[in-house]
Amino acid sequence: MVRRLHKAQSLSFAPIDRNLVQSLYSHINKKAFEMTSITIELQEKVAERLQELADLHNMAPNEYAGEELTELVLDPKAETRRLAREIVKKNAELYRRLA
């Protein structure tokens, strides 16, 4: 008796951007950077939104604001990298199962 095996559907992923991986790694290795503190005044509405965004990322508002500001100032492709981080975070379980 001959059995026919069906090939499983394969998933295709875009090639990995090495710069993106390095950027993500640098964010994980935060202790490697020297920090300076600043104080800013925010409108209540802005402060509330900052808190919401920080909560979504399981971060303190000052930590979230600091990371976003760093990317904005130092990296012209910050928005792309931020979106990539969100995608990686949302799909972490899928990536773990596929590994």
Image (tube, rainbow, N blue to C red):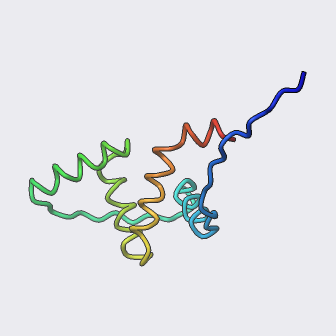
Q: Tell me the residue at 39%/66% (across/down).
A: 36
Residue 56 x, y percent position in the rendering: 32, 44
Does residue 32 appear left or right of residue 4 in this picture? left
Eyeballing the image, is 44 above or below 73? Answer: above
Q: Residue 8 falls in which quadrant of the image?
A: top right
Residue 55 x, y percent position in the rendering: 30, 42
Considering the image in quadrants, where does the C terminus appear? top right
Which residue occupies the foreground of this view, 69 or 16?
A: 16
Q: Tell me the residue at 52%/64% (across/down).
A: 33
Q: Residue furthest top?
A: 1
Residue 38 x, y percent position in the rendering: 29, 65
Q: How many marks on residues? A: 0
Residue 60 x, y percent position in the rendering: 33, 46
Q: Tell me the residue at 55%/65% (across/down).
A: 23
Does residue 85 appear left or right of residue 51 in this picture? right
Q: Residue 17 falls in which quadrant of the image?
A: bottom right
Considering the image in quadrants, where does the N terminus appear? top right
Does residue 50 appear left or right of residue 12 in this picture? left
Which residue occupies the foreground of this view, 19 or 2?
A: 2
Which residue occupies the foreground of this view, 74 or 1?
A: 1
Q: Residue furthest front?
A: 1
Eyeballing the image, is 10 above or below 77? Answer: above
Q: Residue furthest right?
A: 1
Q: Tell me the residue at 66%/40% (across/down).
A: 98
